[in-house]
Amino acid sequence: MELLPANLQRLKDQVAIVTGASRGIGKATAFALAQEGAKVVVNYASSSDAADAVVAEIVNAGGSAIALKADVSQPEEVDNLIKETVNQLGRIDMLVNNAGITRDTLMLRMKLEDWQSVINLNLTGVFLCCKAVSKIMLKQRSGRIINISSVAGQMGNPGQANYSAAKAGVIGLTKTLAKEFAPRGVTVNAVAPGFIETDMTSGLQAEEILKMIPLSRYGKPEEIAGMIRFLCADVSANYITGQVFNVDGGMVM
Ligand code: NAP
């Protein structure tokens, strides 16, 4: 990873929290925001070595990052994540709600705990993080919140009743918060990835999936991070709120 030259960095002195940034899309997002000069909180739940490696790569490139452990489905841990971020980095300008899990199985076999664990992290976790940063962002009258949804929340997907419901919920939450926060200059948008090459999709049958993707390939984590970077760093994004951006090779159109 290389930082942009200082005069081209658009997020200098700004602080971003990326949840679930130890790998996959979150890791690529941490790198993208760090390249723009942001100080990045690399949140993780259990992969401390991986999170430390992400931080080390950013710091070795001349950037600024810290790793903070927090299970973002737990209210006290979210409060602590926000408190520690402010203690160590002084402010919060961007929140990327990226942490997510799958517990896929057909409805007939889906246990209540499969449903609840996915809703607890993928939807309630987003609520908890948005609520915790909102106090800070509304007071400072600026902020960018990016929630990671999914095409599954728009189209549905067999075996993903829990995941699709959570990701559809994220879209409703995003639009409502966009309306509530707009008067204070805080924008809230969602990114809906299609199938992206990460650990989450590594066990899937590619052949059937590729038939659904007009561009005939999985996306790369950097391609999702690029959209998040645009929403966080580009001045053109100042006038964008309450939107869902599909980065999915044309799956949803
Ligand atoms: P991934 O490679 O499985 O990475 C998930 C990340 O979330 C890891 O850093 C993991 O850290 C973290 N995490 C898991 N549980 C957590 C918790 N309770 N609290 C905090 N962090 C937690 O996933 P990904 O494919 O990059 O997906 C990232 C996001 O994009 C998810 O919201 C996912 O639903 C969404 N998405 C992905 C795809 C895709 O095709 N990959 C498509 C659409 C949407 P630990 O290892 O420390 O737990």
Image (tube, helix red, strand yellow):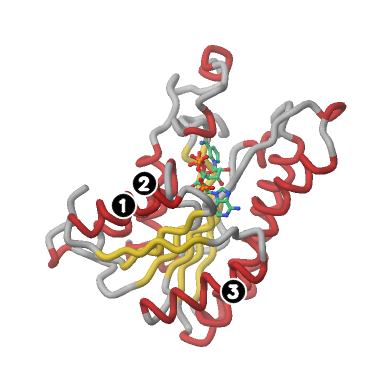
Q: Is residue 15 left or right of residue 108?
A: left
Residue 192 at x, y = what percent?
A: 54, 44
**Pointer 3: what residue?**
79
Disc 1 to disc 3, C-alpha distance: 24 Å
Residue 131: x percent and y percent? 63, 72
Q: Residue 178, can we see it?
A: no
Relative to the observer, which residue lies in front, 158 or 112?
Answer: 112
Q: Amino acid at mark 2?
A: Ala
Q: Nearer the viewer, residue 79 or 154?
A: 79
Q: In the image, what residue type sits under mark 3?
A: Asp
In front of the other: 251 or 83: 83
Q: Secondary structure at mark 2?
A: helix
Q: Which of the two labelled residues, at mark 2 and mark 3, occupies the earlier sequence position?
A: 2
- The residue indicated by pointer 1 is 31
How far is the residue under mark 2 from the one under mark 3? 25 Å
- Residue 10: % across, % down: 25, 66
Number of marks drawn: 3
Kindly give the residue lying farthest to the bottom in the view shown: 139
Residue 132 visible in the displayed image: yes
Residue farthest top in this picture = 207
Disc on the earlier residue, 1 or 3: 1
